[in-house]
Amino acid sequence: GAVVSQHPSWVICKSGTSVKIECRSLDFQATTMFWYRQFPKQSLMLMATSNEGSKATYEQGVEKDKFLINHASLTLSTLTVTSAHPEDSSFYICSARLAGRSSNEQFFGPGTRLTVL
Amino acid sequence: GESVGLHLPTLSVQEGDNSIINCAYSNSASDYFIWYKQESGKGPQFIIDIRSNMDKRQGQRVTVLLNKTVKHLSLQIAATQPGDSAVYFCAEWEGNFNKFYFGSGTKLNVKP
């Protein structure tokens, strides 16, 4: 149980286009999902916290107008990279926290590799 | 956010030896820590966790030690195997901010 999926797993796009990444909790409900970005040979950096039915909370330095987050249901959060540029190329990882649990446990998706040409 | 850092960026060990990966954290209020394993091109995989009311926790071939006095935790892997080769991250739970912060990671190379 507690499986998180991401789609797509890899996307290549032209500079200036927008890309949507989906994060789904497959067998559980998640009131909170987290979005991370990871550059090669670096650690995961938290971008934002996505709460179902409310606005996402962004980390300092992360442009909310560039990285649009929507958490419309208890099983789906989306991250849209708007007007992507080569410097946005990265590995984007989401995680989900079980709803209704006091535990801090979160489950990670497999990641989405974004390459902007 | 608070910093969570690792002492060694890479660690090479012989197959069968024990591995020790270290992590320092700076927020004394953090009360929950997790070690993750990440293989190339994949998402992090949970290994073991520990709460601040404990100083040691054991899993299958892995042990996490927490020293709150010096704000340090370590991951010990017994009888390291080639399949253990990966990057290992410690993560610190900041309850007040309701989020995890990850350390910089240690790459473990297991030599056959």
Image: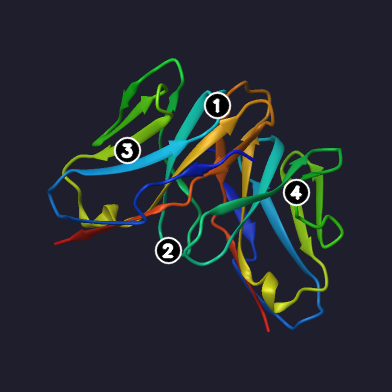
Q: Badges 4 and 1: C-beta atoms under 8 Å apart? A: no
> Does B44 sit left or right of B54 as displayed?
right
Query: Which residue is identified by label 4?
Result: A60
Which image quadrant is residue A39 in? bottom right
Q: Depth-wise, is mark 3 or mark 1 nearer the camera?
A: 1
Please report, as a chain letter, where disc 3 is located.
Answer: B
Tell me if residue B92 comes above or below residue B68 in the rendering: below
Q: Secondary structure at mark 1?
A: loop
Q: Is circle 2 on the same chain as circle 4?
A: no
**Residue drawn at 69 percent across, 31 percent down:** B97
Question: Residue B30, image x and y in percent?
Answer: 55, 26
Mark closest to the chain's N terminus, 1 or 2: 1
Q: Which residue is mark 1?
A: B30
Residue located beneath label 3 in the image: B75
Distance Cα–Cα, label 3 vs label 4: 30 Å
Dot 1: chain letter: B
Q: In x, y percent, where is residue B85?
A: 29, 57
